[in-house]
Image (cartoon, rainbow, N blue to C red):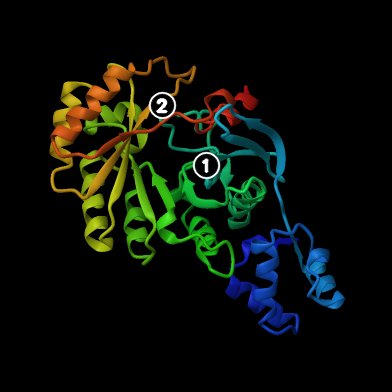
Amino acid sequence: MRNIYDLSYQQLAQELNALSEPAFRAAQIFDWLYKKNVRSFDDMRNLSVDLRGKLQEAFEIQHLTVDHHGRSSDETQKILFKLSDLEHIETVLIPTSTRATVCVSTQAGCKFGCRFCASGIGGWKRNLTPGEILAQVLHMKKIADGQGRPVSHIVFMGVGEPLDNYENLMSAIRVINDEKAINIGARRITVSTCGVIPKIHALAQEGLQIELAISLHGYDNESRDVLMPVNKKYPFDDLMDACREYIAKTKRQITFEYILIKDVTCSPQAIQSLKKAFKGLICKMNLIPYNPVSEFDHQTPSRQEMFAFKDQLETFGIHATIRAPRGRDVNAACGQLRHSTQK
């Protein structure tokens, strides 16, 4: 049976037409699904009993099964979801005092194998459907709404490479952005990529004002080769060229994510190489303290070392911030909780 969350508004209207129902019913159903976040067709009380019966015969409202729900001392919440085929994904709810951000997975596992990341340790299993992506957002939205801190931002930085599941990602983003559905502004949606260059070009053509984040994590070809196997297919210099083209096309700033690993990524050589690579770019850097995984035996730099690196970047005109760790006591870093269940 088809998952109704997999349908766009236009697709749902077409399906209703095939059921001899007027197109305006699509707006009512979207309102129940995405505004009221109901879990059953029987709860859609302004639909006729006959239509509810048709929907139950044609579709299901497919929600995710919670396998583990972790709550951090800093109020970050991480859920390990079990999918219908028993694969697992992770979703994180990151609150502030007034709102919340949801960090969403796009794949079960990851094929790109970044050495410092727990997501790809168990390998890639499959892409998530649009409905499975949206179900994560809706589950966390219900929690956030109940706490009086509505979801205002979505970041595709969970398990998997978003641009490796491009069509399903974009289908989900359009529903998230749709004012008839979840209605989160495009500028509050961030897609992170390890550098899949053809899809960066495709994203630039979409005409959406979404935020792009590049998981750079190396300062030149050699350093990135060691940490990120994807660099052998999409080399550092080619990636930087693609970023320049993206900025020229979209007039949007790019965020570069850069992991801070002691004696690996925050050397004087790194500073000089980044200065050269970022010359003339409209961008900012998000410096991420390394969150240790057992398979990659390295250390996080000291606070003093991290701020010294940040200050040197800013001396060269590169705006940089250091990401504050969230949810470490619930394995909230990408892939850690999922990986712990597979050991």
Name the residue rendered at 60%, 35% in the picture. 78
The residue lying at 33 percent from left, 16 percent from top is 302
Mark 2 lies on a secondary structure that is loop
Residue 101 in view in this figure: no
Quarter of the image for the N terminus: give it: bottom right
The residue wearing badge 2 is 115
Q: Identify the residue under disc 1.
A: 97
The picture places residue 176, in percent across and down from the top left corner, at 54, 60
Quarter the C terminus occupies: top right
Question: 208 or 45, which lies in front?
Answer: 45
Residue 192 shown left or right of residue 11 in the figure: left
Residue 7 on image: x %, y %: 62, 66
Q: Nearer the viewer, residue 305 or 83?
A: 305
The amino acid type found where label 1 is placed reads Ser
Task: Name the side, left or right, on which 179 lies relative to 18.
Answer: left
Q: Earlier in the sequence, mark 2 or mark 1?
A: 1
Relative vertical location of residue 136 with respect to residue 262 in this rendering, above or below:
below
Q: Residue at x 27, y 18 (%)?
A: 305
Q: In the displayed structure, would residue 23 be above or below residue 7?
A: below
Q: Secondary structure at mark 1?
A: loop
- Look at label 2 and name its amino acid: Arg
Q: CA distance from mark 2 to mark 1?
A: 34 Å
Dividing the picture into quadrants, the one containing residue 10 is: bottom right
When the figure is inspected, residue 76 is found, relative to residue 139, above or below; the finding is above
- Which residue is more in the foreground, 90 or 93? 93
Q: Is residue 128 above or below residue 310?
A: below
**Corner quadrant of residue 223:** top left
